[in-house]
């Protein structure tokens, strides 16, 4: 029996995770569920999955949740705040942590799980993009097991030899081919991009996801973050990671070997596949995803990304190549810019411009510890806000 904490259980990944768990009650129990502000949804999940603990974002939310659970589930302990997130991610009684909080807010609890030697199912790519080597070092030191949930990285993991040790060259890997759908604006006239609305940007053609990652997919910053994520997960240099546009989202990514072999993982675009894979690893369990019928898909297409249309992808490659604090600055600037776009404060094309300006403005430094990293994250956020308020 694996006892699981789901960080961000009310989100898109969190809900898909609970869907898979519910299919295998004999294998999994829920240790803790966490949500930021959707208290009623979290209360429903608590009544159904009976965790030992539930964590919310504020004292007021905790009071509200306790009241909702009082009659039917008074034994569930309700906590709130960042320290409580770290507590449920690192508790002795928890074996596995699904890290599915969106953005930098997920860094501290994901890192707490890494330091505590947990099996970490990592959806929260921003945490790894920001902290890079610090995260990988924490995993190594504690003996934690890090399994990627991001569909591309999960696919790559499946296409690499078992027991993969972050040494691509030693295993004959030539390149990692990261597939990208191209998002909702793949064919839209570039000069009309400035006027797209948040609703158009979050309407992804193949995937149903949270709002932030949906905007990231529309700018292709999501793919940029994934290039950096692949670098840290698989130890591949930027030059070994190639992005390929594949609008059908059926091939989730590929690994190209020096003998000319290319291995791919295919499936319907549904996050329950990578979630089930990581939960049961190295076994396989049913996920609820319908089998892929390639005769219905009919065609698989591929093309190179256009960096004029998707400047965020280039910014991410630049940040990876620059090293040090660059990826943390990129990530923080992106989070603030995307929120400003979703709030209707800026146009779509301002997202990449704000990130580029922030990266040009802030000097790079080495990030040797988490405090330094968080300083850089804050500085980048303040810089974007100052541009927004100017
Ligand atoms: P979402 O917006 O649907 O859910 C986010 C979750 O995080 C919610 O449960 C919310 O309560 C919680 N949360 C938000 N802000 C918080 C804060 N400040 N403190 C604590 N908790 C907070 O997002 P999602 O689409 O489920 O994505 C989650 C993560 O998984 C992201 O990092 C995303 O990039 C990654 N991911 C998602 C998908 C997908 O298909 N949705 C695919 C690959 C990777
Ligand atoms: Mg992905």
Image: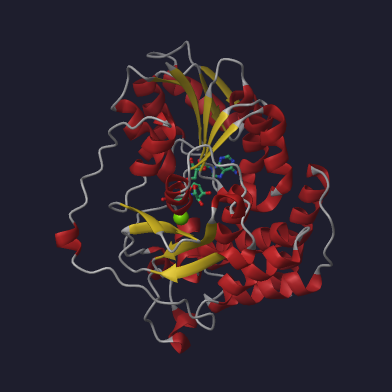
User: In the image shown, does 388 or 242 lie closer to the viewer?
Assistant: 242
- Pinpoint residue 8: horizontal percent, then vertical percent: 50, 38
Quadrant of the rendering where the C terminus is positioned: bottom right
Above or below for 240 versus 115: below
Above or below for 288 versus 104: above
Q: How many marks?
A: 0
User: In the image shown, does 335 or 163 lie closer to the viewer?
Assistant: 163
Quadrant of residue 230 within the rendered picture: bottom right
- Farthest residue in the front direction? 259
- Farthest residue in the bottom direction? 191
Quadrant of residue 58 within the rendered picture: top right
* Visible residue check, residue 33: no
* Visible residue check, residue 357: yes
Quadrant of the rendering where the N terminus is positioned: top left
Above or below for 339 versus 315: above
- Pinpoint residue 14: horizontal percent, then vertical percent: 43, 38
- Pinpoint residue 253: horizontal percent, then vertical percent: 42, 58
33 horizontally vs 189: left or right? right
Residue at horizontal 43 percent and vertical 32 percent from the top: 281
Residue at horizontal 55 percent and vertical 28 percent from the top: 55
Above or below for 183 versus 97: below
Coloring applied to the structure = secondary structure
- Farthest residue in the left direction? 295
362 horizontally vs 120: left or right? right
154 horizontally vs 80: left or right? left
Residue at horizontal 51 percent and vertical 63 percent from the top: 223
- Pinpoint residue 142: horizontal percent, then vertical percent: 69, 28
User: In the image shown, does 255 or 383 lie closer to the viewer?
Assistant: 255
């Amino acid at each position: 029996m694996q006892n699981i904490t789901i960080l961000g259980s009310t989100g898109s990944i969190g809900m898909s995770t609970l869907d898979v768990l519910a299919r295998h009650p004999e294998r999994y129990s829920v240790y803790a569920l966490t949500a930021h502000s959707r208290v009623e949804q979290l209360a429903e999940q608590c009544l159904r999955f009976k965790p030992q603990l539930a964590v919310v974002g504020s004292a007021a939310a905790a009071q509200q949740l306790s009241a909702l659970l009082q009659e039917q589930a008074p034994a569930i302990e309700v906590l709130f705040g960042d320290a409580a997130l770290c507590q449920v991610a690192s508790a002795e009684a928890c074996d596995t942590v699904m890290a599915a909080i969106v953005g930098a807010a997920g860094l501290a609890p994901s890192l707490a799980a890494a330091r505590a030697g947990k099996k970490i199912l990592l959806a929260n790519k921003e945490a790894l993009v920001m902290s890079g080597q610090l995260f990988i070092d924490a995993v190594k030191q504690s003996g934690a097991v890090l399994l990627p949930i991001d569909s591309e990285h999960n696919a790559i993991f499946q296409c690499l030899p078992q027991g993969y040790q972050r040494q691509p060259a030693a295993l004959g890997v030539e390149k990692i081919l990261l597939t990208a759908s191209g998002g909702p604006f793949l064919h839209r006239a570039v000069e009309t991009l400035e006027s797209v609305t948040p609703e158009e940007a979050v309407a992804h053609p193949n995937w149903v996801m949270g709002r932030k990652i949906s905007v990231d997919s529309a700018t292709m910053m999501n793919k940029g973050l994934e290039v950096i994520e692949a670098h840290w997960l698989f130890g591949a240099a930027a030059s070994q990671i190639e992005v390929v546009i594949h609008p059908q989202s059926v091939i989730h990514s590929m690994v190209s070997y020096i003998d000319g072999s290319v291995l791919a993982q295919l499936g319907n675009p549904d996050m329950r596949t990578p979630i089930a894979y990581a939960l049961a690893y190295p076994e396989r369990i049913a996920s609820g995803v319908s089998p892929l019928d390639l005769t219905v898909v009919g065609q698989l297409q591929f093309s190179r990304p256009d960096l004029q249309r998707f400047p965020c992808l280039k910014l991410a490659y630049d940040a990876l190549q620059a090293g040090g604090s660059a990826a943390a600055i990129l990530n923080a600037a992106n989070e603030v810019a995307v929120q400003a776009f979703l709030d209707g404060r800026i146009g779509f094309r301002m997202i990449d411009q704000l990130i580029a300006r922030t990266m040009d403005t802030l000097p790079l430094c080495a990030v040797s510890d988490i405090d330094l990293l968080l300083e850089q994250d804050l500085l980048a956020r303040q810089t974007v806000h100052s541009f927004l308020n100017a």
